[in-house]
Image (tube, helix red, strand yellow):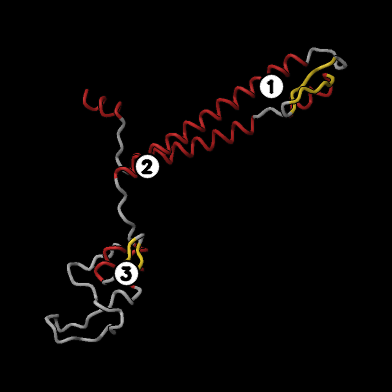
Amino acid sequence: MLLCGSRIRESGEDFAKCRGLDFGGAQPPAAPAQTPHSTSNSNHSAAPSTNLLSSRQPVEISKKRKPPISQQEIISTYRQMNSEMQSLIQQLTKAEMERNEHRLVEETLEPLDPDRRAFRLVGGVLVERTVKEVLPSVKENRLDTLTKHIEVKLEEKRKETFAWKAKYNIKTQEEMEAAQKQ
């Protein structure tokens, strides 16, 4: 008996169905105890039979051949890639807004007296400092590297999504309508 998924399989044919093996219309071997070169006197051909259950050949074939991807899997992967791109776009927008806010604070603090009180939000806590203490940290934390990093990740994801779309010839509704108009 063999356990496949949640069902117990008893025969070689059931094992083959369970494991997705294709015997090309031939019957699978009946028992794993047969040797690869034994012949029987039944209605089988005179060629030596091979025991596919005990040999490693089906395992090697299954490693070489990937099961075909269904249309649902292709579309769900494409949608997931698009949602990841949208997430990266939102992160980029947020980082750019924070970067612009830092520039605005920097421009506001530069003309002020260095000994003037300034308040800074650190980890959700408002801290009182002087302008000369706050200004260097604001200049230092420009968020330029973060935005560049997100832009690089976004471009990689765009390329990956475009390659996936081209590989499986995916067309959006707008592309289909534009093709019909022409």
Which numbered disc, 3 or 1, marks the residue that appears first in the sequence?
A: 3
Which of the pair 96/182 is nearer the observer? 96
Badge 2: residue crowd in 10 Å (few <14, some 14–19, many ≥20): some
**What kind of residue is marked 2?**
Trp
Q: Quadrant of the C terminus?
A: top left
Residue at x-position 38% and y-position 39%:
78
Which of the pair 113/126 is nearer the observer? 126
| Residue farthest along the left direction in this orientation | 43
Q: Where residue 27 appears, x then y in whole percent?
A: 19, 72
Q: Which residue is mark 1?
A: 102
Which numbered disc, 1 or 2, marks the residue that appears first in the sequence?
A: 1
Mark 2 and mark 3 in contact? Answer it, CB < 8 Å.
Answer: no
The Cα atoms of the two marked residues, 2 and 3, are separated by: 30 Å
**What kind of residue is marked 3?**
Pro
Q: Say which mark, if any, is on residue 164.
A: 2
Q: Where residue 104 appears, x then y in whole percent?
A: 68, 16
Badge 3: residue crowd in 10 Å (few <14, some 14–19, many ≥20): some
Q: Nearer the viewer, mark 2 or mark 3?
A: 3
Left or right of 26: which side holds 139? right
Report which quarter residue 82 is drawn in. Answer: top left
Q: Which residue is mark 3?
A: 58
Badge 1: residue crowd in 10 Å (few <14, some 14–19, many ≥20): some
**What kind of residue is marked 1?**
His
Kindly state the secondary structure of the residue where label 3 is placed: helix
Q: Quadrant of the N terminus?
A: bottom left
Report which quarter residue 91 is drawn in. Answer: top right
The Cα atoms of the two marked residues, 3 and 1, are separated by: 62 Å
